[in-house]
Amino acid sequence: MTDRPNIDPQEWELRCDLAAAYRLFAHFGMDDLIFTHLSVRLPGKDHRFLLNPFGYLFDEITASSLIAVDPEGHAIEEIDEAKINNAGFTIHSAVHMAREDAQCVMHSHTTAGMAVAAQEQGLLPLNQMSMQFFGRTSYHDYEGIALDLDERERLVRDLGDNSAMILRHHGLLTTGRTVGDAFYEMYYLEQACRLQVAATQGGQKVVMPPDSVAEHTASQFESFEGKGRRPWAALKRRLDRQSPDYAT
């Protein structure tokens, strides 16, 4: 139960989903101490979104600890003097304001994701997991720590209409119409990067499928509507058993 009864039920549900995503990032080893961010847009036309308080580990995040911020980076309500990370605000505000379908935005600094982000060819269609991103992954060149608001325009331009982007020398970014969809994209983008690192370290030449097969596979994945819905429901059931305090 929430100890903040002034929050309407729709917002509370989004808070619980986003807090669950933070806990699952930690569970799957996709967190980076107190850094990187996951965000979700709040209902309404003012582009407010929820972001984690800077300084909290991901397995400490709860629904009530998330901070609502406006498009200018101002916290609508400070919680226990918690602040937001300006670098996280720059990236997430850019995507939320430009893409109506990007209700949720996730960004990671994983070893595998950053390794592939440093490779010249980027993500390769080496397996079924990675083929779903074939021709559907954007790239954004590194410009330094994302503190410059001018970078927002270039981030949005490079992302285009895709739901997955590799930030060169930086990490991974995914979007989704729901928290579950964005998490599904991030989980499998991360898995694709882990598999690529493993395959290229094997000492043998990797075999690439024909582009036609990779495109066909990606199209098959696209035909699955709401593909993140069932995995997300299952993952939340796990959290409800193992760490139900995320929803407080």
Image: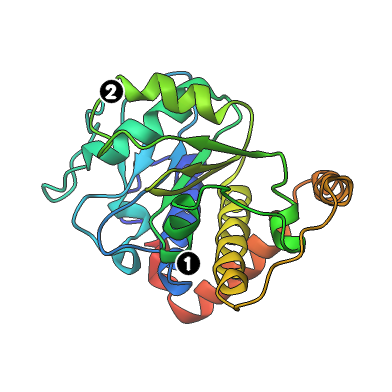
User: Which coloring applies here?
Assistant: rainbow
Looking at the picture, which amino acid does disc 2 mark?
A: Leu
Is residue 54 left or right of 68 when viewed as pictured? left
Label 1: state its secondary structure. Answer: helix
User: Residue 149 — which label?
Assistant: 2
CB under 8 Å between callouts 1 and 2? Answer: no
Q: Say above or below: 141 vs 233.
A: above
Q: CA distance from mark 1 to mark 2?
A: 29 Å
Visible residue check, residue 44: no
- Label 1: how many residues lie within 10 Å, few (<14), some (14-19) or many (20+)? many
Residue at (32% x, 61% y) in the render: 61
Which mark identifies residue 24? 1
* Residue sitting at the far left: 81
Q: Position of residue 153 (x, y in %)?
A: 41, 19
User: Judging from the image, what secondary structure is the residue with disc 2 in?
Assistant: loop
Q: Quadrant of the C terminus?
A: bottom left
The mark that comes first in sequence, 1 or 2, is 1
* 38 w.r.t. 112: above or below: above
Depth check: 22 or 126 in front? Answer: 126
Total marks in image: 2
